[in-house]
Amino acid sequence: MTTTKIAPELIADHAHSASARVDSDYKHLGEQLARRGVNIDTLKADVAKFAVAVPSWGVGTGGTRFARFPGKGEPRNVFDKLQDCGVINQLVRCTPTVSPHFPWDKVSDYKELRQHAESFGLGFDAVNSNTFSDQKDQPRSYKFGSLTHADAGVRAQAVAHNIECIEIGKQIGSKALTVWIGDGSNFPGQSHFRRQFDRYLDSNRQIYAALPDGWQMFLEHKMFEPAFYATVIQDWGSSLLAALSLGEKARCLVDLGHHAPNTNIEMIVARLVHAQKLAGFHFNDSKYGDDDLDSGSINPFQLFLVFNELVDAAQSKAPNFNPAYMLDQSHNVTDPIESLMTSAVTVQRCYAQALLVDRVALTGYQDSNDVLMAAQTLKSAFHTDVTPLLQKIRIEAGGAADPVATYRASGYRANMAAIRPASGPSSGIV
Ligand code: LRH
Ligand code: MN
């Protein structure tokens, strides 16, 4: 019988042998937090509800334009990808949904795909369209753009693809379409900025009109790549202009890696919350460009500061505030399952720490210009080690105290390497 999951007994054994130390660490953390007026069980109940979606394209080994070095037991198709996402959620218990990408995840029977996902306890988050690469026997090329291409025929093809993604999404239970396009230019003069933006709005109005009730469309901005001089939706300003022009169902998605180094992303989040246009996130980390590194692996304090804005918005009941949380990473040198598990836990950790910010004290220090104490109030939350809380939540949810240790003990990757043929090295992202 081929392995499709981690043996529940193994997870239970590991959780059992960890529970004594986790309980004592949890008790100790509880005493520390009680001294700060925080009830750890109330905090646990809140953090236990946190969930972040896994990108279907994240469980395969990623690459760069220079090369891709495939790992062992690579998923062969979307069914394998969902199985691997099932393993991730078995161990971390906070990734119950998958964000699919089309046509990479195209199948002939979406009812079967939905049932396959459900067999692993998974649902589907936002669907992602792809008009940034040409598919085999695609009539018209996206070389010079898609939704903003000067040729109406290419734009119509791109609009039709996005509407097809919505139709697929309806069958698999998604409630949102993420539209990221690489459209832009490499040379000054190559494109007319205003006419190009008008074409973007015109194409997206047609996609917007096809959105079922209860659906949203997430506009994803990106500073550069594949365009290297100008990108049509280059920054949150262009994205917000478009979302405001399109209507209520259009929101702005923030991919952390899509900004210039040192951009104050947490302030962009506060602005989009103010505009009631925050769609959600593609969490990852980067030092230079759109590096798609593991969330919190380079700048965990920035990730915490983003969640500080999100918790502040939620606690102050900001109107129309219900952001979607998704990972969007490319794993070139690690086991994608291990990276996605540790990244999901890192994002959950930043949410828990943001809940520990004493907002009454912070407001007092801000309003009295006690700058140092205001900064320290955030730092003391960020410096709180909530590991026992996250372990307790996982164990109580039937997951692993230490997901990577249990995953490695399961031999899942070796088992997959035995049944999934090795795919050769190649260049470019899968
Ligand atoms: C673009 C992006 C987008 C996805 C792609 C895989 O850089 O972040 O969200 O479509 O990565
Ligand atoms: Mn993204």
Image (cartoon, grey):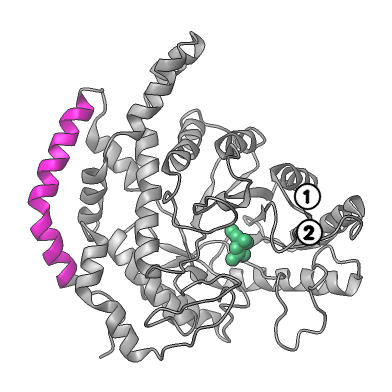
> Chief secondary structure of the magenta span?
helix
Instruction: Count residues near mark 1 (Cα–Cα under 10 Å), then give few for <14, some for 14-19, many for 20+.
Output: many
Image height of 293 relative to 63, above or below = above
User: What residue is disc 1 on?
Assistant: 246
- Residue 391: percent from the left, percent from the top? 22, 51
Q: What residue type is labelled 1?
A: Leu
Q: Nearer the viewer, residue 253 or 72?
A: 72
In the image, which disc is placed on residue 204? Answer: 2
- Magenta extent: 9-34
Ligand 1 image-quadrant field? bottom right
| Residue 339 pos. (x, y %) | 38, 62
Q: In this view, does 395 lie above or below 76?
A: above
Is residue 98 rendered magenta in the image? no
At a point 25% along the width and 45% down the height, the residue shown is: 387
What is the quadrant of the N terminus in the image?
A: bottom left
Q: Where is residue 290 in the image (x, y as percent from the top left)?
A: 59, 56
Q: Distance between the residues labelled 2 and 1?
A: 7 Å
- Label 1 beta carbon less than 8 Å to ligand 1: no
379 to 163, vertically: above or below: above
- Tag 2 and tag 1, C-beta contact below 8 Å: yes
